[in-house]
Image: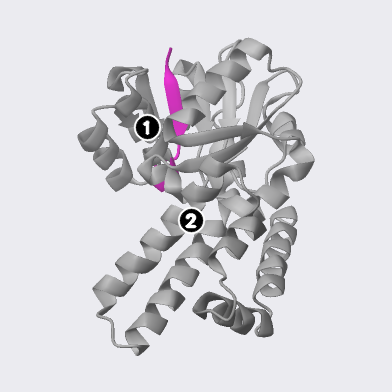
């Protein structure tokens, strides 16, 4: 099976790393294209894949074609792809905001298309990718795509109407988490902790808390209550966060992000 990439940026590189590391796909089975000569050269050197600047050439060769360009460049990127796809090719789009309807209009309504929204933790194999197949994707093709996406973390099928919410709660969420980690570390630094230690403690607290929730299956409110002893330090911190509209602000951020996604 030949895997093609249109765009060789960070997310494409994360997926390439994942599928090669898993051992399911060999480097010689991967081909990529990018307008940047530096990106082409780096992909060849880092992964041992074939890379070029010709999108059409990649489209002709790929059994699975992954679109990994910025939304503002997708129309231009698809021009040399049209009419070049193999009959049974699967097109996987990680282009933010671009619907299945848009992709079908560009590539043909009979094209097998899967719309996805990954996030940057895919770079370390801990991503979460939502995916939505169109009506032309059968169970076998869906399984192929899910296996590829699972090489960089979780892959979860959702209805397309949820995709903008996915952008708000997952695709863009690492930025909110990094801000939270940075803010906690700043507080520890104010209390006299060296910054490198503050980042380590804050990051591990986020990592461990997320793992605790996932592995226990407990409601986040229940886990929060487990930490909040009567008249203790944690409930005092929670009170301060509530006074600052912490939860409402986070909710508003997710909603605004989703609304922006709808306009792309």
Q: Foreground: 116 or 254?
A: 254
Q: Is residue 35 visible?
A: no
| Residue of label 2 | 209
Label located before the other in sequence (1 or 2): 1
Residue at point 68%, 20% (across, down): 111
Q: How is the image coloured?
A: one colour
Q: Foreground: 155 or 132?
A: 155
Choose top left, top right, bottom left or bottom right for residue 125: top left
**Callout 2 secondary element:** helix
**Callout 1 secondary element:** helix
Q: Is residue 46 visible?
A: yes
Residue at point 65%, 51% (across, down): 219
Are circles 1 and 2 on residues that touch, CB within 8 Å?
Answer: no
Residue at point 79%, 42% (across, down): 161
- In this picture, which residue range is highlighted in magenta? 1-11
Q: Residue furthest front?
A: 230
Residue 184 lies, in percent from the top left, at 44, 76
**Looking at the picture, does residue 218 appear above or below residue 104?**
below
Cα distance between the residues tagged 1 and 2: 25 Å
Dot label at residue 18: 1
Is 263 left, or right, of 202 in this rendering?
right
Dot label at residue 45: none
Determine if the magenta segment contains residue 2. yes
Q: Foreground: 123 or 250?
A: 250
Q: For marks 1 and 2, give the one nearer the viewer.
A: 2
| Image quadrant where one finds the C terminus | bottom right
Determine if the magenta segment contains residue 259. no
Residue 37 lies, in percent from the top left, at 30, 44
């Amino acid at each position: 099976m030949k895997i093609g990439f249109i765009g060789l940026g960070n997310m494409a590189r994360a997926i390439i790393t994942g599928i090669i590391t898993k051992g399911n796909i060999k480097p010689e089975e991967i081909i990529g294209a990018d307008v940047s000569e530096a990106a082409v050269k780096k992909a060849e050197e880092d992964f041992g894949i074939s890379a070029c600047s010709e999108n059409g050439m990649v489209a002709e060769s790929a059994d699975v074609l992954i679109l990994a360009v910025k939304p503002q460049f997708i129309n231009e990127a698809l021009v040399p792809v049209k009419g070049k796809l193999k009959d049974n090719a699967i097109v996987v789009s990680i282009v933010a905001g671009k619907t299945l309807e848009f992709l079908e209009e560009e590539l043909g309504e009979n094209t097998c298309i899967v719309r996805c929204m990954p996030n940057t933790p895919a770079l370390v194999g801990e991503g979460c990718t939502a995916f939505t197949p169109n009506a032309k994707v059968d169970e076998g093709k869906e399984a192929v795509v899910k296996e590829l996406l699972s090489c960089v973390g979780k892959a979860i099928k959702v209805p397309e109407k949820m995709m903008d919410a996915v952008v708000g709660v997952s695709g863009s969420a690492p930025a909110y988490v990094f801000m939270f980690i940075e803010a906690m570390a700043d507080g520890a630094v104010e209390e006299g902790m060296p910054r490198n230690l503050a980042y380590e403690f804050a990051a591990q607290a986020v990592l461990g808390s997320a793992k605790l929730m996932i592995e226990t299956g407990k409601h986040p409110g229940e886990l929060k209550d487990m930490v909040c002893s009567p008249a203790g330090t944690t409930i005092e911190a929670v009170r301060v966060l509530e006074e600052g509209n912490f939860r409402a602000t986070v909710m508003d951020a997710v909603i605004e992000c989703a609304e922006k996604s709808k306009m792309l």
